[in-house]
């Protein structure tokens, strides 16, 4: 048993006070870069002007022989680069790997004041969050940090999905979750080798034509990730944290990437990962509410006055609930407009 009032106590003497609310900062795209690659590192200042979040990746996609170089590269970049309004996150190695302890020690003590969020892969249950929570507190105390680091977990194992609510509620540091379709597919023994997106074999088919047995029966591809996305969004929102779609691996298929991102946006996600500069713009477009929707929502809010009762607008019924829906749209548009004069103008704020 642990008393509720102790939930917000620091986990180590001298560690900063945990946050009570997860700050909403634009994070439409979490753009991954390899800090061990000097070419990519050189592009960071320019990318920072285009991205809401830049993430120095230390985990999968970084060769074992480059793990230390990636960690050191990230320290150097964080120290030497002014990222402006762009947040800096990192994805540490998995908790069972030989690198993670040094990832945490080095990053928090050397650049803890520059990092906003630590992404933890392959989280399986609340115990994984508790482990990171305590170590972060100890290291924050050692480094004399004033602001607590936040934790973002990747939902990418079957056990993680089974425990998703507990993961979200495991610590006041929990900032959000990303769906990791590649590792999740492997963990579940799904038979897809794609990173996100649909699969031509996962379909529903129309009934046979009783008058013509040989007639072609149309099929519609279904979304392999719908169930997980829905669970993730509910679990996140129930704990006041933010849901994200993760990677879309087919970089050349910009259309399907946009579809996957938009499905996530419509279901409540606030952003997605971008693995290539071409995906940055897609995420920006998709995760910023459409101008027409925002104008419609502003109109509804205006006509609904104090937000109670019911009115008809263009033949569509509006009441207290649609006012709440419209507020979601307008509040997001407002928040995104703060640092984006172009958006502000388009939304008419
Ligand atoms: C992301 O890490 C994934 O496994 O999809
Ligand atoms: Mg993964």
Image (tube, helix red, strand yellow):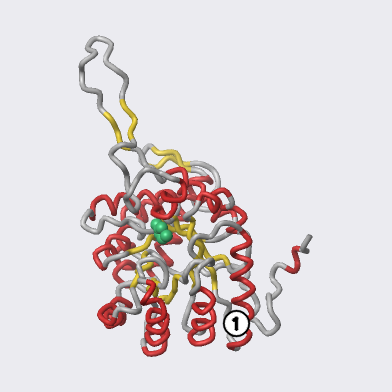
Picture quadrant where residue 31 is located = bottom left
Q: Secondary structure at mark 1?
A: helix
The quadrant of the image that shows the N terminus is bottom right
Q: Nearer the viewer, residue 285 or 188?
A: 188
Q: Find ligand 1 in the image and state its quadrant.
A: bottom left
The percent position of residue 26, horizontal first and vertical second, equals: 42, 68
The percent position of residue 250, horizontal first and vertical second, equals: 26, 55
Q: Nearer the viewer, residue 325 or 77?
A: 77
Q: Which residue is tagged 1?
A: 139
The percent position of residue 255, horizontal first and vertical second, equals: 23, 51
The quadrant of the image that shows the C terminus is bottom left
Which residue appears at 43% of the width and 45% of the height?
189
* Whether residue 135 is situated above or below residue 178 in the rendered picture: below
* Whether residue 213 is situated above or below residue 216 in the rendered picture: above
The percent position of residue 347, horizontal first and vertical second, equals: 33, 62
Residue 136 can be seen, yes or no: yes
* Whether residue 344 is situated above or below residue 259 in the rendered picture: below
Which residue appears at 50% of the width and 69% of the height?
97
Q: Nearer the viewer, residue 281 or 209?
A: 209
Q: Residues within 10 Å of mark 1 (few under 14, many from 20)?
A: many
Picture quadrant where residue 3 is located = bottom right
């Amino acid at each position: 048993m642990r008393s509720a009032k102790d939930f917000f106590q620091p986990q180590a003497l001298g560690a900063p006070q945990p946050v009570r609310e997860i700050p909403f900062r634009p994070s439409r795209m979490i753009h991954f870069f390899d800090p061990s690659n000097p070419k990519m590192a050189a592009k960071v200042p320019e990318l920072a002007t285009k991205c809401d979040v830049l993430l120095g990746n230390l985990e999968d996609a970084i060769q074992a022989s480059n793990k230390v170089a990636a960690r050191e590269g990230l320290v150097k970049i964080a120290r030497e680069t002014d990222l402006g309004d762009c947040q800096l996150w990192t994805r540490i190695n998995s908790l069972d790997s030989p690198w993670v302890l040094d990832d945490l020690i080095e990053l928090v003590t050397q650049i803890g004041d520059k990092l906003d969020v630590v992404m933890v892969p392959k989280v399986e249950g609340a115990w994984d969050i508790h482990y990171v929570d305590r170590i972060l507190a100890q290291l924050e105390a050692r480094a004399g940090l004033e602001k607590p680091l936040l934790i973002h977990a990747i939902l990418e194992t079957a056990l993680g999905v089974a425990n998703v609510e507990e993961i979200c509620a495991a610590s006041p540091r929990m900032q959000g979750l990303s769906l990791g379709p590649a590792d999740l597919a492997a963990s579940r023994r799904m038979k897809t080798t794609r990173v996100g997106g649909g699969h031509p074999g996962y379909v529903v088919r129309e009934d046979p034509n009783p008058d013509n047995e040989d007639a072609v029966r149309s099929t519609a591809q279904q979304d392999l990730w719908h169930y997980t996305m829905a669970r993730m969004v509910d679990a996140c929102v129930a704990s006041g944290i933010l849901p994200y779609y993760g990677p879309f691996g087919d970089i050349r298929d910009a259309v399907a990437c946009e579809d996957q991102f938009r499905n996530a946006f419509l279901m409540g996600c606030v952003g997605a990962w971008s693995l290539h500069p071409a995906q940055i713009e897609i995420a920006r477009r998709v995760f910023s509410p459409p101008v027409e929707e925002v104008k419609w929502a502003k109109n509804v809010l205006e006509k609904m006055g104090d937000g109670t009762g019911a009115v008809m607008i263009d033949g569509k019924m509006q009441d207290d609930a649609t006012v709440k829906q419209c507020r979601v749209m307008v509040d997001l548009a407002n928040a995104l407009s703060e640092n984006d004069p172009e958006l502000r103008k388009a939304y008419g704020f």
